[in-house]
């Protein structure tokens, strides 16, 4: 594999990127990744308005996640090849254009195509994360990853209430138009704030992409961590795609109320700094087992809402989101130490695999809910992280 060296405009590697840059990156990652979730509480509105069949409605969310996985495999590796500011500006500009296309979509086919493109371009969040993490010394990298991931998770969780409120007030199309403007503003802000990073690589784009299969084969840690988080994210996506339907159908909630329910999961972001410090202290294994167990417990609690009522759903959202967030940070902290020169590609593989798990969860939601009801969804959602927990429990520690 050709050698890749990294040059920075300023000598930041010893002291890190700086708190201001880290906080700006956290806010930007949250704004970018929110694009993947605006449609989630609006699935029934969009499907009804554009004539999408009920059994295919969850494809609105699944296609965005598939697009994100494609972007992670084909665009995120460019972090190891292309100057950072130029790469982020181009990717965010594409995201803004795709969001405008979704806002103006005349039919379901156009909207679904735009959803795929939104997912591909929103990979800018996973370009930014390894860029900033790579500037940090090893001893504090977990804390910085935790801070940025807090912003990313807040973006995921706030996307739903914001989308619900905006859709109730101005219609679902307004949400995508507003996000297009936000992406343009984010591109300008990052261009001014983020240090330039110029990889000095002799690899072609084809060689860069081809090397990803070799990286996946070389590092069993990458494969394990990606599959654990894929199972967790499948349960996460299943819960957050199905819960709006549950709240609307069983409890008669409006879209604004459903959006506000998503704020419950925002408490999961509070676990991020703790998870990062836990990883820095060398407690990744026990932290992983606890985090995945939270995923199982969250889906069990969700299935008990027939006895616990809304309290069961609320607790399920909190416990599930905390587990998903903690396991994500523990995994990224571990894989970022595998190969500094290939950090963009390794991160791309990791997140692409977990988002394919998320796409599976979203795609399963409508048919499972239609044929087996809420209890069936809870069983499927608990089984996925339970399999990951069994694998993690018997994992042999690396030396």
Image: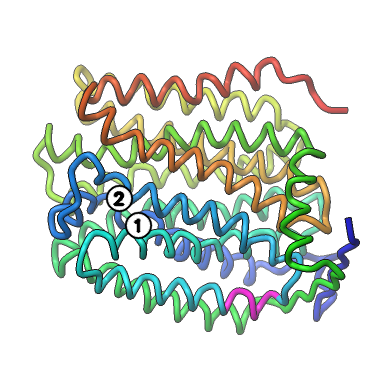
Image position of 199 with respect to 133: above or below: below
- x 90%, y 62%: residue: 3
Magenta-highlighted stretch: main secondary structure? helix
For the residue pair 125 and 223, the one nearer the viewer reads as: 223
Residue span colored magenta: 84-89
Between tags 1 and 2, which lies in front?
2
- x 42%, y 75%: residue: 96
Image position of 281 with respect to 83: above or below: above
Residue 159, labelled with which disc? 1
Q: Quadrant of the C terminus?
A: top right
Reading the image, the residue beneath label 2 is 40
Q: How many marks?
A: 2
- Say which label, 1 or 2, has the lower sequence index: 2
Q: Is residue 8 magenta?
A: no
For the residue pair 139 and 329, the one nearer the viewer reads as: 329
Residue 394 place in picture, x, y as percent: 69, 15
Q: Secondary structure at mark 2?
A: helix
- x 50%, y 25%: residue: 385
Q: Quadrant of residue 88?
A: bottom right
250 relative to 160 in the view: left or right: left
Q: Quadrant of the N terminus?
A: bottom right
């Amino acid at each position: 594999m050709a050698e890749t060296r990294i040059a920075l405009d300023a000598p930041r590697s010893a002291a890190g990127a700086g708190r201001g840059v880290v906080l700006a990156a956290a806010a930007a990652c949250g704004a970018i990744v929110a694009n993947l979730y605006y449609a989630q509480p609006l699935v029934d509105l969009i499907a009804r308005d554009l004539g999408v069949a009920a059994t295919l409605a969850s494809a609105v969310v699944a296609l965005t996640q598939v697009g994100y996985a494609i972007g992670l495999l084909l665009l995120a590796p460019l972090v190891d090849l292309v100057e950072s500011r130029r790469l982020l500006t181009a990717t965010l500009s594409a995201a803004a254009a795709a969001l405008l296309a979704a806002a103006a979509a005349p039919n379901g086919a156009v909207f679904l195509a735009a959803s795929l493109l939104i997912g591909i371009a929103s990979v800018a969040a996973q370009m930014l994360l390894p860029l900033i993490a790579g500037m940090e010394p090893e001893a504090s990298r977990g804390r910085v990853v935790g801070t940025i991931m807090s912003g990313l998770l807040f973006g995921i969780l706030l996307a739903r209430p914001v989308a619900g409120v905006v859709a109730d007030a101005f219609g679902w199309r307004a949400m995508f138009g507003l996000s297009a403007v936000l992406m343009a503003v984010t591109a300008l802000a990052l261009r001014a704030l983020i240090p330039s990073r110029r990889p000095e690589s002799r690899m072609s784009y084809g060689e860069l992409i081809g090397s990803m299969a070799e990286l996946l084969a070389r590092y069993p840690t990458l494969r394990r961590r990606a599959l654990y988080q894929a199972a967790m994210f499948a349960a996460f996506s299943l819960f957050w795609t199905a819960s709006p339907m549950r709240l609307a159908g069983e409890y008669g909630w409006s879209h604004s109320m459903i959006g506000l329910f998503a704020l419950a999961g925002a408490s999961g972001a509070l676990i991020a700094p703790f998870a990062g410090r836990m990883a820095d202290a060398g407690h990744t294994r026990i932290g992983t087992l606890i985090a995945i167990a939270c995923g199982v417990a969250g889906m069990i609690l969700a299935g008990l809402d027939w006895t616990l009522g809304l309290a069961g759903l609320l607790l399920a959202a909190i416990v599930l989101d905390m587990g998903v967030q903690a396991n994500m940070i523990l995994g990224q902290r571990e894989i970022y130490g595998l190969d500094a020169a290939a950090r963009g590609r390794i991160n791309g593989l990791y997140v692409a695999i977990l988002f394919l798990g998320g796409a599976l969860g979203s795609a399963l939601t409508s048919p499972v809910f239609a044929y087996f009801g809420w209890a069936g969804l809870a069983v499927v959602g608990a089984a996925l992280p339970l399999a990951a927990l069994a694998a993690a429990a018997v994992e042999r520690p690396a030396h």
